[in-house]
Image (spheres, rainbow, N blue to C red):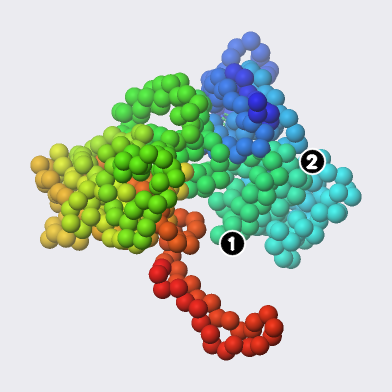
Amino acid sequence: MDEIAISLTDVSKCFKRYRHPVDRLKEILFPGKARADEFWALQNINLEIPKGKTLGIVGRNGSGKSTLLQIIVGTLAPTSGDVHVRGRISALLELGSGFNPEFTGRQNVFFNGQLLGLTQAEIEERFDDIVGFADIGDFLDQPVKTYSSGMFVRLAFAVATSVDPDILVVDEALSVGDEAFQRKCFARLETIQERGGTILFVSHAAGTVIELCDSAILMYDGELLLTHTPKTVIDKYHKLIYAPAEKTEEIRREIRAFDRGKTRDRLIPKIPDFATEINGHLGNGSHGEVANSAIFQQGARAFYDPEMKPAETIAYESRGAKIIDPKIITLRDQQVNNLVGRHEYVYTYTVEFSQTAYRVRFGMLVKTISGMEIGGASYAFSDYADTNIVEAGTKLVVKFRFKCLLNPGVYFLNAGVSGVVDGSFTYLDRCIDVAMFRVLPEENLMGTGTVDFVVKPSLTVEKTAIGVEKQGELIETENY
Ligand SMILES: Nc1ncnc2c1ncn2[C@@H]1O[C@H](COP(=O)(O)OP(=O)(O)OP(=O)(O)O)[C@@H](O)[C@H]1O
């Protein structure tokens, strides 16, 4: 059983909203008559976060993310329900919280360090590390009210993470810093993860949630709508926010039902075992034979496996166009989904327009199993036609020719068509995980990671063990 770091049982939060500020005073002076409207920012939240895991929290503005974090951190009390937090918690909430604007950065390091439970001696011990990480130069001795939001986050993040927290809560803050600082922050988050720390992370950046988090939750109007893998949560979230207003309730119900119906193993994406599948395809009997089979040799050939299909495709509500028959074909029009690295293929789909659309664009995206976006492309209809109007009733075949510069593994494809219908620019149709493909393993591949850089290795011997120099002797591998 996982040890639970944070648990919330039936947590709700009600705020009072007064129409006029004076109503608040009237309510105190003349109790008995309610003068405020009740607003439920959180409703019956049940959540368990295991120790050592990173949870992503996504949701549009005002969905209750910050309220949830503040209740976990303890700066806000729930109206009802129970919250249990085990371990030292450190938080980087909204800009400004925890720092006194009149104090200098230096004073705030001590002030904030003490709030986080460090002694004076402990702060002094970590001071150089904090200041080094924040890297804000002379501003350290200026009042923090003179800081830019980036400087502020640098110092706040440095302090929040210097206390070796068991639980770190980060609310959006990192999006403020520049790229170099963000990278430094992510490296520090990774260190906390490796040390077994628990992290709660609010972000609107889909890629970051997918890369950083073990699981994610989707908040919507104070409701915890879905707990799932980061990729599924992001996909459903996007489906919800890009839907036309009249469809959102229906999609919300659909996501709620999906959440209730999920079983534990649906949290783990099912990837068919390569060896078993290929053996089946080639009629081989055992794993051992695969290593000797033709597909592992140089000169492997692409082929189509009808069994290899995404477990679930998420289709957005279409508005005026429909994507049909997305697939990968060879340059000779043969459908394939087992591809050979460094060969060229075509990703193609057909689009049927039911409404006249303007400024139409066609897009594709390739992602890893975990949902990390590797690359994609888009082009406009007007790049290939004299007009930017696509009339209702038109049917187009969209093609993206590409070179498969990916290392062996399983990948997923999106397809999307955007444009102007009914006066607004929108997705006309969009499908997530509409197709999948595998890049076949080959012998003697030395690439690691996801992207195949078509590396050509070489080695020059400058000195041998006995100290004799051998100028210019070059060992080159040609077979890559
Ligand atoms: N002190 C308060 N009094 C009244 N309403 C509040 C208060 N704090 C938050 N709310 C309301 O509660 C809802 C949830 O707010 P919250 O800040 O938790 O959302 P959020 O998902 O973090 O939004 P964002 O992405 O914009 O930060 C909002 O409608 C907000 O207006």
Residue at 56 percent across and 19 percent down: it is 44
- Residue at the far right in the pictured view: 121
Q: Quadrant of residue 355?
A: top left
Q: Position of residue 191 (x, y in %)?
A: 68, 50
Q: Quadrant of residue 196?
A: top right
Ligand number 1: quarter of image: top right
Chain-order first, disc 1 or disc 2 = 2
Q: Which residue is mark 2?
A: 115
Marks 1/2: CA–CA distance: 28 Å
Q: Decide if residue 79 is on the left or right side of residue 107.
A: left
Examine the rendering and report whether any part of residue 205 can be seen: no
**Beta carbon of the mark 2 residue lies under 8 A of ligand 1:** no
Q: Amino acid at mark 2?
A: Leu
Examine the rendering and report whether any part of residue 253 can be seen: yes
Q: Which residue is mark 1?
A: 180
Residue at 59 percent across and 57 percent down: it is 183
Q: Position of residue 306 (x, y in %)?
A: 27, 39
Residue at 65 percent across and 26 percent down: it is 1
Mark 1 vs mark 2, foreground winner is 1
Q: Secondary structure at mark 2?
A: helix
- Identify whether 41 is placed above or below 448: above
Q: Secondary structure at mark 1?
A: helix
Q: Position of residue 149 (x, y in %)?
A: 61, 54
